[in-house]
Amino acid sequence: MIEDRLAQTLDRAAAAAPPEDGAFDRFLRHRARRSRRLATATALALVPVVAAAVILPRLGQDPDRRPRLYVSGVAGPERWQRGPLVAVAPQEGFEVEVPAGWEATPTWKGIALRPVSPQLGRLLKVPVALDTTYLEAFYQPSSKDLYKDNSQLPQTALSRPRSDPQTRGRFPEGRGWFRTDGQDGRWWFTRWYVSWPYHCQAGRRCPDVLAMRALRVAFQADPAAVPQVTTLAEGLLRSARPITNAVAGGPQVPRPDCLEGRSMTAQRVAYSSRPAPPRPLVIHFYWTFSGTANMVPCTIRGPLGVELIDGSGRRLEVQGNPLALAPVGDLPESQRWSGEASTVELTLKWINWCGQGPTRLRWIGEPGSGASGPIRPPRCTDPSKPARLSVERIRR
Amino acid sequence: MGAGVTGSGREFREFFAAEYGRLRGLGFLLTGDWAQAEELAQDALVRTYRAWPRVRRHERPGAYARKVLINRHRSLLRRAAVEARHLRGRRVEEAVEADLGTDGLVLWSAVRRLPARQRAVLVLRYHEDLPEAEVARLLGLPLGTVKSLAHRGLARLRGELGSPAMEETRGTGR
């Protein structure tokens, strides 16, 4: 019976394990690494909060003493504060006045607002949202020359509500707006946008698509509350002030760390190794990252690393082994654009291997760790000298 | 950790000693790679350790660790689908050093060539000796899908055992 033969073969294959020496010690290290990673992620998540609190009061052009609500870009519990106050979102590049009668709490990419009055509150399906998004060229008057650099809008960053009434206009101050309105059962909904282009830091390549950023107010309300909420929405869009990356040449705030799945997707890892005549082995490693639909510019903290191991997974005695890279670099301010700027390439050189047995590579870091099949080691050139692994080049 | 100090730590250490080899073996059968198998087993045990105060009261704490390992493997498979497009076969699975015999080697080669889900179903069904309903639960698949994957996997193994390609492998195996 094939089933019996299969069971027997699987049992034998699983039993052919390399020695388990030191497995528990490796477990302790593995566990410590995970704990450290968690602690580091928590600590680093606080960096933008602290930075925003320290730096922004100096950047602000408004000398008044009104209370401020800072949007840190880090998810957290709701912190409702009553207006009048000034909400500051440095990563999103806006500062806005929350009027009396409303309270606000930071969200990941902006603020949410709700009325202080419970009567009015009951007429809102959800809190009013103010955040940034990206609008298609379709909505932008200056769209005809966009995307020449092949930069892409994220699939999920915006919707095209073709069936909803769309209107355009201009506030008295000159700021142009775009708006969609509709009704879903009891609730009237409105999405109201003004252009809010993103400006990259001086000297950085800036994808065309970032000019598509927009500041958006969205609400769903009972028709009886629409006039009041519309007044609030208009006030927000008219009073919003561009700061940081919404100002050409403006001061930049520290980037938050990239979080896998939220601001970053680690797409793949690839490697190649080839003997470089006459002696060393040159290993190329490529990690590719891209931003998510949220397009949050962020720093990839890493670490990324490469380790030479033997056939049973033990580290080889090679100077410089293992190699780790941290922080890795900044993720470009977009989902992707031509030029593969989000690939990190690490080129290593391994020389003088006089050991025996199979040799392999293990890598760590997103997207997960893994190991190669057998690779051909470099030649033994001098048994009296140690083998050495070194970084030849890092290209970000 | 306190693993060598507290009663709970000692208990976990005993659990580790009892389960590590089995988990690593399961990881190897699922991935065909001892290094990945070790990562999977270590990861599963670290996660089990974090839940240990709760898990230690289970009737079979090992089943919890196995479930974690299988979940982790499923998540790696999803990533691997992307990675595989770029690595294009550069990753070479390890040779088994066990004495499987000629027939065993042929069968193992065929198992390694099975699609990941078929392989996982067969490993859990015939190595872990789990009923189909339990395999379905662990893999998050409908029972019918598990039955179909097992049926197709076995049929493919039967087919490959007699194919000319396998005759060639068998020759190399000698």
Image: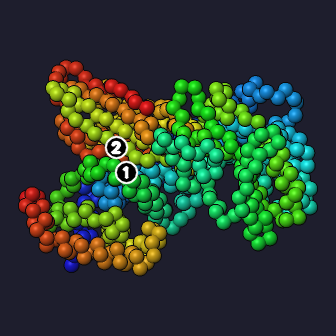
SS of the residue under disc 2: strand
Q: Position of residue A238 (x, y in %)?
A: 80, 42
The figure's colour scheme reads: rainbow
How busy is the neighbourhood of tag 2: few (under 14 within 10 Å), some, or many (20 plus)?
some
Q: Amino acid at mark 2?
A: Ala
Residue A165 picture quarter: bottom right
SS at badge 1: helix
Q: Chain of mark 1?
A: B
Q: Which mark is residue A309?
A: none
Q: Position of residue B5 (x, y in %)?
A: 53, 44
Res A57 quadrant in image: top right
Image height check: is B38 above or below A10?
Answer: above
Compared across the picture, whether A48 is left or right of A14 comes to right
Figure quadrant of the N terminus of chain A = bottom left
Q: Residue at x 34, y 60 (%)?
A: B30
Q: What residue is shown at x 56% (from left), y 63% (from top)?
A: B57
Circle 2 is placed at which residue position? A270
Q: Is residue A38 above or below residue B21?
A: above
Q: Which residue is mark 1?
A: B83
**Whether residue A19 is visible:** no
Q: Amino acid at mark 1?
A: Glu
Q: Quadrant of the rendered structure where residue A118 is? A: bottom right
CB under 8 Å between discs 2 and 1: yes
Q: Position of residue A275 (x, y in %)?
A: 20, 32
Residue beneath the point at 58% across and 40% down = A210
| Residue in front for this viewpoint, A4 or A87 | A87
In three-dimensional space, the C-alpha distance between marks 2 and 1, rounded to whole angstroms, equals 8 Å
**Residue A94 visible to the viewer:** yes
Nearest the eye: A293 or B152: A293
Q: Name the quadrant of the C terminus of chain A.
A: top left
